[in-house]
Amino acid sequence: MLKTRFAPSPTGYLHIGGLRTALFNWLWARRNGGQFLLRVEDTDLTRNSKEALDAILQAFDWVGMDYDGEVIYQSKRFDLYREYIDRLLKEGKAYRCYMTKEELDSLREEQQKRGERPRYDGRYRDFKGTPPEGIEPVVRIKAPQDGYITFTDGVKGEISIASSEVDDFIIARSDGTPTYNFVVAIDDALMELDDIIRGDDHLYNTPKQIVVYNALGFKIPNFYHVAMINNEQGKKLSKRDGATDVMEYKRMGYLPEALLNFLVRLGWSHGDQEIFSIDEMIALFDPKDINRSASNYNLDKLLWLNSHYIKNSSDERLIKLLKDFGVDLESNPKSSMILNATKERGKTIKELAEQIKKIINPPEEYDKKALKRAFKGRAKEILADFKEFLREREDSLNSSEDYHNLLKEFVASQEIGFGKIGQPLRVALLGELSGSGLDEIMSILGVEETIDRIERVLSLF
């Protein structure tokens, strides 16, 4: 059974780059009928945040990415890691290093002066003497000193690094706590992972982890290192560009399926297809098809996808989602009419809520530029005439089509262009010059509310 994993650190919130990595692992596990495991890398006890951890778990729940089994917490496995550290020490594959910070700083300074890459020089690798007093040692693993560390990356191809580039790195600090590359290798091996899909910022951690795998006789998994997500200018993605807490996307009114569809296309493709259901993603995703080059975040694409999923959502779902944005249509008899009039225009649930509020609530103020533009020439008289025209035909108005025909009849009778009534009427109803169709709005409001709003705007002049 194929196993993949996602391993966030609860020192910060889950961002979309992390969610994309999780999505790729989840899709691959689900396509193969395998297991997707969640491991929390919380060994940095001073920086862990319960709020960040809760937000990570909420994000998984919100997007519907289920994981198998219990969440694994590294902070609860320190005894296990110590067992493996002791084993490597006993087998002579690791050793205690008594080098002080001052000595290490001095060594690095000398190496930099000679134009060398700073690295530990192995001075305690075969130390047999008496340990210096008063120094709590770190534990270093014995890395190979010749040859190459080679592995095949599923995205980038064969990677080969000279063993001399990997020094005897620390696997346990002086206080006994294990280091990142050590615990990651231990856990990935014990969780029996087959494929590890992660960001290519981890690419140069892989040789160190392979050293640990080999020292302990563990099977080495398949690695896929995914290029980063850049901003629209091709530079590192920042918070301003969209690298924000995943749950912030929910608060901004995005649908989870739109966000997942957006993320799966950042670095992976299937022909020219842009819209993928979750089932299609599972059926088609293969990490071997991940692009080598970085992807660019495109807000317009995300909004386009979100708009698509809003338009195709049921009224029941939209009514439920809108409650979080201050709109309750549950008991409104015209809820379907309201949604039909607005969901073509709302790119987010937040935008949709704002569109609806403008219809169901009378304008509290009027856009000054819109007033000036709409009420030129005879606009006031035309709108007043329309009010009377509307009242005279009140009994025959039962649908948006009736209101549409009414507008056509009025324009013809007045021998004017549609804009002559359309602009002042729209400002009267919404307080601005943009929005849903006038026939739909009037059908929702009814004759009395429409007339009331017309009279309110006319009273300004």
Image: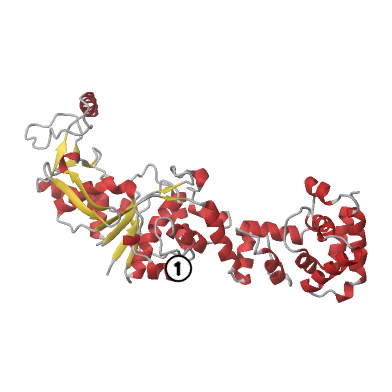
- On screen, residue 333 versus residue 15, left or right, reads right
- Residue 452: image quadrant is bottom right
What residue sits 87% from the left and 49% below the top?
A: 376
- On screen, residue 269 versus residue 431, left or right, reads left
Mark 1 residue type: Ile
> Can the viewer see residue 120?
yes
Residue 237 in the image: x percent, y percent? Answer: 45, 45
Q: Is residue 332 above or below residue 456?
A: below
Q: Is residue 64 above or below residue 423?
A: below
Q: Is residue 97 above or below residue 251?
A: above
What residue sits 11% from the left and 37% below the top?
A: 125
> Can the viewer see residue 69?
no
- Residue 340: image quadrant is bottom right
What residue sits 72% from the left and 70% below the top?
A: 337
Residue 163 in the image: x percent, y percent? Answer: 16, 43
Q: How many labels does the image show?
A: 1
- On screen, residue 97 versus residue 198, left or right, reads left
Disc 1 is placed on an element classified as helix
Name the foreground residue: 30 vs 271: 271
Residue 36 in the image: x percent, y percent? Answer: 34, 64
- On screen, residue 118 versus residue 198, left or right, reads left
- Residue 128: image quadrant is top left
**Residue at label 1?**
278
What residue sits 60% from the left and 63% below the top?
A: 321
